Image (cartoon, rainbow, N blue to C red):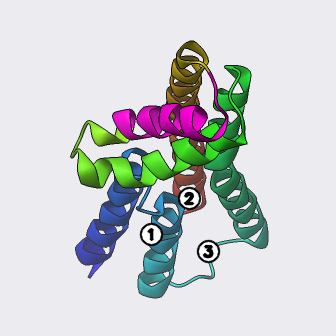
């Protein structure tokens, strides 16, 4: 049973990291799933209260990181709310329309199209906004990856 539990925990952590690239997968929930699986197999008694408080705070941070990084990237490069919405829609739709590359191309195209259609921006500003959405997305991946690693290290330290 020991091997089964740790296999499931590691598998859920691995899916969490896949979720960094495919935002349709709620990565932080798979981190928590690993904690729950471990608790179900080995008991929750070894997790102190402060562990859960810290992990919940990290979870809140991770849920906000996506939208915040995307919005900051678009805004910093001169985009509008339309660019933010277009980038977000492109982020969700892109991987389904263009497998693999869609995760990078989707936010860019979404931001550019939204800026051109709804904000009546110039092509130069729309392209700049698209680059901003891409920078925001990549920044979000790195930030979330670091936070997820910290969450897992904390888990390992407690266990």
Front residue of this view, candidates 65 and 114: 114
107 versus 29 height, above or below: above
Q: Could you tell me if residue 146 is visible in this image?
A: no
Kindly indicate whether the residue at mark 2 contacts the one at mark 1 (C-beta within 8 angstroms): yes
Q: Earlier in the sequence, mark 2 or mark 3?
A: 3
Circle 1 sits on which residue? 34
* Residue that lies at the very extreme toward the top in this rendered image: 124
Magenta range is 104-121
Circle 3 sits on which residue? 46
130 versus 114 height, above or below: above
For the residues carrying marks 1 and 2, which lies nearer the camera in this image? 1
Q: Is residue 139 magenta?
A: no
Q: Earlier in the sequence, mark 1 or mark 2?
A: 1
Percent coordinates x, y for residue 22 in the rendering? 37, 51
Percent coordinates x, y for residue 57 in the rendering? 75, 59
Local SS, label 1: helix
Q: Could you tell me if residue 101 is visible in this image?
A: yes
Q: Is residue 105 magenta?
A: yes
Q: Earlier in the sequence, mark 1 or mark 3?
A: 1
Circle 2 sits on which residue? 155
Front residue of this view, candidates 94 and 42: 94
Q: Could you tell whether 102 is left or right of 84 in the image?
A: left
Quadrant housing residue 106: top left
| Dominant secondary structure (helix, strand or loop) of the stretch shown in magenta | helix
């Amino acid at each position: 049973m020991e091997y089964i539990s740790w296999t499931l925990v590691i598998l859920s952590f691995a899916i969490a990291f896949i979720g960094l690239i495919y935002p349709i997968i709620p990565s932080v929930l798979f981190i928590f799933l690993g904690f729950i699986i471990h608790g179900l197999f080995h008991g929750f008694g070894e997790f102190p209260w402060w562990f859960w408080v810290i992990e919940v705070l990290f979870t809140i941070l991770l849920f906000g990181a996506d939208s915040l990084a995307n919005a900051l990237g678009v805004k910093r490069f001169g985009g509008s709310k339309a660019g933010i919405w277009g980038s977000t829609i492109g982020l969700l739709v892109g991987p389904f329309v263009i497998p693999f590359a869609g995760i990078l191309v989707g936010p860019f195209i979404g931001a550019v199209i939204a800026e051109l259609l709804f904000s009546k921006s110039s092509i130069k500003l729309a392209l700049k906004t698209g680059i901003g959405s891409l920078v925001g997305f990549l920044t979000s991946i790195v930030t979330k990856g670091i936070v997820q690693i910290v969450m897992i290290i904390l888990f390992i330290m407690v266990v």
